Amino acid sequence: MPLTAQQGYAIREEHAGVREAAVCAAHGLVQRGGSQTKVDGENSTERKSIKNAKGASTQVHLTTQKKFIDTLSAPQEFIKRFCGSPDLDNRGIDRYYANEIDTELTQEFITFLEDNKKRIIDLVISNGCGITSVVYRDITNEIEYELTYEDILRKVESCRWVMKKGGIHLKDSNNKTYFHLQREGKRNPRNRYNILFHIHRALFL
């Protein structure tokens, strides 16, 4: 049974609050956090991002189409069609899936992703916050993983972007997804068309 909004909020508050404070203490960090920073805990030499996941992936970055396009000079037309817009009408749907978008636009966007792979990953995990490592907490199995910023960039270097119907996945040579992007897709038009990135447990294995 899906979680209600209230249940989801309670889970996020628990893991971003008391439990995350315990993680910070175990790592010798002062807890930070908040919507304006990627830093969840830091000390004099480290700035860590802590991701809490109940499954194989969890949200790592959320941005508007405009900000993503302006920051990275990304191809605008593919993003508008893929993530949607109030003025689009694809047989009654306000977006196009990847397999419905012109091949030329699709290839242009894949080329952009490949050419800017490290810039994109830097944006989604650090975004100017000087993150030194990412802690991935599998809260279902009570397992904690950690990779340094440099190790993450090294691991994605040989990966490739793969277009799926509703998401674009960064995969390794064994077809394991490390990151993927999709549209946010909420009902509220204010955040329905945003770009959402997920980080996957497979990156840390």
Image (spheres, rainbow, N blue to C red):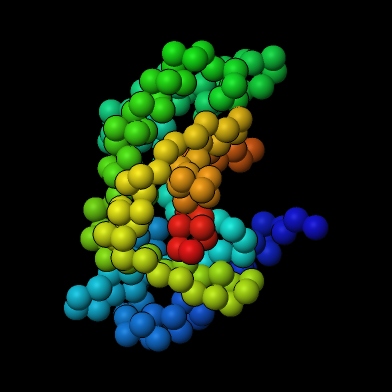
Closer-to-camera residue (114/124): 114
Give the farthest residue toward the left. 44
Place of residue 136 in the rendered image (x, y in percent of width and height, measured from the top left): 47, 67
Give the farthest residue toward the front. 174
Closer-to-camera residue (119/90): 119
Q: Residue at x 62, y 65 (%)?
A: 54
Residue 112: tell me if it is visible.
yes
Q: Residue at x 64, y 71 (%)?
A: 140
Q: Residue at x 60, y 18 (%)?
A: 100
Place of residue 17 in the rendered image (x, y in percent of width and height, measured from the top left): 49, 75
- In the figure, is residue 45 to the left or right of 42? left
Give the farthest residue toward the right. 1
Residue 95: tell me if it is visible.
no
Q: Is residue 64 above or below residue 175?
A: above
Closer-to-camera residue (203/134): 203
Place of residue 32 in the rendered image (x, y in percent of width and height, measured from the top left): 34, 72
Quarter of the picture containing the N terminus is: bottom right
Place of residue 71 in the rendered image (x, y in percent of width and height, measured from the top left): 28, 36
- In the figure, is residue 196 to the left or right of 74? right
Q: Is residue 138 above or below residue 2?
A: below
Q: Residue at x 31, y 60 (%)?
A: 151
Q: Is residue 174 above or below residue 136?
A: above
Q: Quadrant of residue 130?
A: bottom left
Q: How many marks?
A: 0
Q: Is residue 157 above or below residue 115?
A: below
